[in-house]
Amino acid sequence: MLADLTRTDRHNHRPVAGDSELAEAVKTLARAHQGLVWTRQRQTNQLRSALREFSPGALEAFPDLSSSDVPC
């Protein structure tokens, strides 16, 4: 129905405005942030897996590896 409206009544509708530069920048930053969050979680999961295999005591000492209390 929408396709038919735009084909037959295009002159009655205004064009859709594109995103501003600021909106594009926010989208880019949001995507980058989400990618970093996913990377951090993936690395935390890999660390947890390695510790479980090689040093289970470390997991008992630091059960929440994503916490800021974990020493680097």
Image: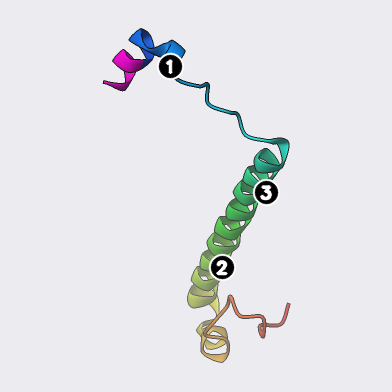
**Rendering quarter of residue 47:** bottom right
Q: How many marks?
A: 3
Q: Which residues are magenta?
A: 1-5
Helix, strand or loop at mark 2? helix
In space, the residues marked 3 and 1 are separated at their CA atoms by 36 Å
In space, the residues marked 2 and 1 are separated at their CA atoms by 54 Å
Relative image position of residue 51 (x, y in whole percent): 54, 75
The quadrant the N terminus occupies is top left
- Give yes or no for contact between labels 2 and 1 (Cβ–Cβ under 8 Å): no
Name the residue tied to disc 1.
12
User: Considering depth in this image, is 35 or 64 the residue closer to the camera?
Assistant: 35
Question: Crowding at label 3, few (<14), some or many (≥20) Cα neighbours within 10 Å?
Answer: few
Indicate yes or no whether the magenta region holds residue 29. Answer: no
Q: Residue at x 58, y 75 (%)?
A: 66
Indicate yes or no whether the magenta region holds residue 2. Answer: yes
Name the residue tied to disc 2.
44
- Give yes or no for contact between labels 3 and 2 (Cβ–Cβ under 8 Å): no
Q: Residue at x 66, y 82 (%)?
A: 70
Name the residue tied to disc 3.
29
Q: Residue at x 58, y 54 (%)?
A: 34
Horizontal arrangement in the rendering, residue 70 relative to residue 59 (left or right): right
